[in-house]
Image (cartoon, helix red, strand yellow):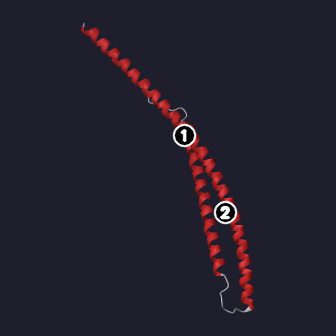
Amino acid sequence: MKKFKFRLEKILHYRDGIKQERLRELQLANQQLRAAEVKLDELRDAFLKNDMPDGNILPVEEVYIRSAYGERLKSEIERQLVFIEQCQAAVEQARAIYIEASREVEVLVKLKERKQEAFNVFVAKQEEIFLDELVTQRVRIHK
């Protein structure tokens, strides 16, 4: 009896490879988002540490430097927030692409399963027919 062979196996393998590539892209996008969030936390910590100490008298130069540094940190925080929004959009896009690739693989897997079941039913019927024929031939021989 012939073995089951799914004629779309190469396409299934190809689509599974694409799915794995899309998963890697999604993981990279998530990694970039996490790194951007860590950098934002670092910027916010630096901004809080740059705060002027209460009750201490500081030289004018230090006040000016802290003020300029604080303004630069504010602008970097704003840029980082925009970058995080872009990263979040990239993650969502990568997730949508991965989900679509997963669905394409899932469709072929389900088709393969149905074809396998149909083949198994066919094989079982063929075996039943063969056994019926064998029994019929034995009965004829013993008569």
Viewer-nearest residue: 31 or 1: 31
Above or below, 77 against 60 in this view is above
Mark 1 secondary-structure assignment: helix
Name the residue located 54 percent from the left edge and 32 percent from the top edge.
7
Residue at image x 56%, y 49%? 20
Classify mark 2: residues with Cα within 10 Å, few (<14), some (14-19) or many (20+).
many
Label 2: element kind: helix
Q: Residue furthest left?
A: 142
At a point 58% along the width and 41% down the height, the residue shown is 103
**Image spot of residue 57 (x, y percent):** 69, 93
Image coordinates of residue 45 in percent, x first then y, are 62, 76
Gap in angstroms between the C-alphas marked 1 and 2: 32 Å
- What amino acid type is highlighted by mark number 2? Ile
Relative to 3, say whether 17 is above or below: below
For image coordinates 32% across by 16% down, the residue present is: 134
Residue ID for mark 2: 84
Q: In the visual, does 47 lie left or right of 24?
A: right
Dot placed on the residue nearer the N-terminal end, 1 or 2: 2
Q: Can you give x and y, in whole percent of width and height, for residue 114 in the image?
A: 49, 31
> In front: 39, or 138?
39
Q: Which residue is mark 1?
A: 106
Q: Quadrant of residue 107?
A: top right
Residue 137 placement: quadrant:
top left
Where 120 sits versus 50, above or below?
above
